[in-house]
Image (spheres, coloured by chain):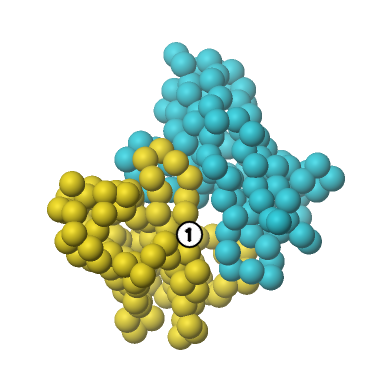
Chain colours: A yellow, B cyan
Amino acid sequence: GAGVSQSPSNKVTEKGKDVELRCDPISGHTALYWYRQSLGQGLEFLIYFQGNSAPDKSGLPSDRFSAERTGGSVSTLTIQRTQQEDSAVYLCASSSPGPRSGNTIYFGEGSWLTVV
Amino acid sequence: AQSVAQPEDQVNVAEGNPLTVKCTYSVSGNPYLFWYVQYPNRGLQFLLKYITGDNLVKGSYGFEAEFNKSQTSFHLKKPSALVSDSALYFCAVRDKSNYQLIWGAGTKLIIKP
């Protein structure tokens, strides 16, 4: 696609439910990042995928959070047993061709999650 | 520790005046430097970056930034501000040996008519 695509754009869920957020990176981009941003705040790194390498999960805040990337393309971020503090916008970004370069990372529009 | 500082939470500028959004960093070596803009309820949009070469980098929407190695700064500038420039601006730095970007906390830019 022309840009990074994220879905859903908005999600309201009840506390305790599981949610899945999807990211479709720019075609050909091998690197994919997930970030979290609380209202009007800075970016919090969650997880990084690069090709077939093991992902960097060091930013995941708890074991309720997990992510996978199938076939080196689409990624899904799953939050289990959601809590109110999980309410935030979840941003996906991708870049090419590799991790150690000056290549720009491009962001999607985000998935806005509200836990009630 | 590696860090990026955006010392101003908010910058207020009158329309038509020049604007500057400050960014300083503490990263080893010669890093890559980026600026992004975030409009309300939107994702981040890439504005410009410094990789190597000319210290003055020009980007989207008339913005430019100057890399100053001795001061470890990468301030964002525009000669004449527009009300539509009002947004949240993020500076980011990447160590050449790492894939991680280190992000500033963001600066809210308000342009008043």
In the foreground, A24 or A67: A67
Chain of the residue displaying label 1:
A
Q: What element carries label 1?
A: strand
Q: In this view, does A38 lie above or below A106?
A: above
Q: Residue at x 64, y 69 (%)?
A: B98
Q: Which residue is labeled 1 in the image?
A: A45
Q: Which residue appears at 64% of the width and 34% of the height? A: B7
Quarter-of-image position of residue A66: bottom left
Q: Position of residue A2 (x, y in %)?
A: 34, 62
Residue A7: quadrant of the picture: bottom left
Q: Front-most of A1 and A15?
A: A15
**Image-based side of A27 in relation to A80, left or right:** right
Instruction: Kindly indicate the quadrant of the structure image that contains residue B86.
Output: top left
Type of residue at label 1? Phe
Q: Where is residue A58 in the image (x, y as percent from the top left)?
A: 50, 69
Looking at the image, residue B99 lies above or below residue A14: below
From what the image shows, is residue A68 above or below residue B106? Answer: below
Q: Which residue sits at x=51%, y=17%?
A: B15
